[in-house]
Image (cartoon, coloured by chain):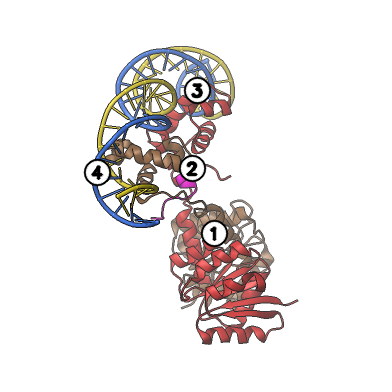
Chain colours: A red, B brown, C yellow, D blue
Amino acid sequence: MPITVAIVEDNPNLRLGASYILRASPDCKVVGEYESAEDFLDELEAVNPDVVLMDIGLPGMSGIAATAQIKNRSPRAQVIMLSVFDDDENVFQAICAGACGYITKPVMPEQLLEAIEQAHQGASPMSPNIARKVLELFKKHMPPPQVDYNLSERELEVLDLLTQGADHKQIAEKLFLSPFTVRAHLRKIYDKLHVHSKSQAVAKALKERLLPRK
Amino acid sequence: MPITVAIVEDNPNLRLGASYILRASPDCKVVGEYESAEDFLDELEAVNPDVVLMDIGLPGMSGIAATAQIKNRSPRAQVIMLSVFDDDENVFQAICAGACGYITKPVMPEQLLEAIEQAHQGASPMSPNIARKVLELFKKHMPPPQVDYNLSERELEVLDLLTQGADHKQIAEKLFLSPFTVRAHLRKIYDKLHVHSKSQAVAKALKERLLPRK
DNA sequence: GATTCCACTGCCAGGCCGGGCAGAATCTAA
DNA sequence: TTAGATTCTGCCCGGCCTGGCAGTGGAATC
């Protein structure tokens, strides 16, 4: 059974080119070609494609906004972004919108077919330069704890509950401790983190990811 | 000028295989083959390769720990992870350690050469299934604001300062407001976020990324 | 012109919080 | 066995914070 593919691309040459490539493959079946996100979204449920090739720089609604809608209304559709843009912001937005792949133009024919197959199999086709962007974004937003504040197990537990919005009394109840003890732990935490309030401690803990991942 | 490559892999067959492939290419120059991370780290500065092919499942020090050290001591080296493991934890750790690429075994010869070239050019070679993992990790850890709490501009400003650990008075000074006004904003924020303290507000703001990225 | 939303200022009461101080039990490493 | 780290409990005080209540003024919408 061939993979059903929809193409959303405003440039007629690129759209026809992609269509031509896909129609030459027995594994793919082009079920729609659109020159705007709006046109495609009108027929999304009726067409229900396995894979969508989505341009980012569309007139009217952008490919990123369209992707968000697609993933909302038809989550099984795998959206591959095709774009000349490879800046951080577009890549970031595309990922958050739910794109499963991101390929920079120009695209080679066999590269396109490969990407569609991978996307359909649950993998993520991605140009290597985009992959690098993603890794950098990842590291930028997920800085692992760089400084070791030397917090003890117990202190981490308390800090964790703090970030869940608990106050002294609630922490004491959850850890079966006296509120006095909780205050003692908090004080040591404040010392070690060089902060002076719950909110500062929470901010530092979350921003610097001091808590083991859950 | 050929790309200098070091290979760290405990399985002799795989190590020799990779070495054989690379030596057959005029673009690469194998400058070291090691069966353990420790052996390689001893010669890191002396060898100073452009690219390192690093196995993850090594005896002794793991490839991930080794990668962290490499990026510390010789940041220009591009490390490509080669691994049979593709679980979230290994991928996550590898990225945080500073790996620029991640390829799952088995590796095809031309795939290997391509990956080395891409890594050397500043891109990130990555198997599509790994790319998918990375995207999922990304989305998991970076959930974009899902609920709109309808905070006003001013309220976001105040919230932002809160996450920087400021108290009422400091916020008032920075925004040139009366402390009373700040309290009014805070109250509206608490209302809208359904929280009852600074620390809860900070936790919610950071966890749900209510603040526009900076 | 009325309504609504936002930003802004103000007071009060009660409770929560942070810092200083004191003491004790457990465990581990020197 | 002594020293240190960790965990635990306790009290006091001053100050900060939260929630309730009251009111002004500007801008946009209707």
Task: State the SS at label 4.
Answer: loop
**Residue ID at (43%, 69%):** A87
Q: CA distance from mark 1 to mark 2?
A: 31 Å
Q: According to the image, label 3 marks what residue? A: A179
Q: Residues within 10 Å of mark 4 (few under 14, many from 20)?
A: few
Task: State the SS at label 1.
Answer: helix
Q: Amino acid at mark 2?
A: Leu
In the image, residue A102 sits, relative to residue A112, either above or below, namely above
In the image, residue D17 sits, relative to residue B57, either above or below, namely above
Same chain, labels 2 and 4: no
* Protein chain holding label 3: A
User: Residue B81's x, y, as percent?
Assistant: 58, 62
Task: Determine if the magenta segment contains residue A121.
Answer: no
Residue A210 circle label: 2
In the image, residue A5 sits, relative to residue B45, either above or below, namely below
Q: Residues within 10 Å of mark 1 (few under 14, many from 20)?
A: many
Residue B40 circle label: 1
Q: CA distance from mark 3 to mark 1?
A: 52 Å
Check the picture and name the quadrant holding the C terminus of chain B: bottom left
Task: Determine if the magenta segment contains residue B205.
Answer: yes
Same chain, labels 4 and 1: yes
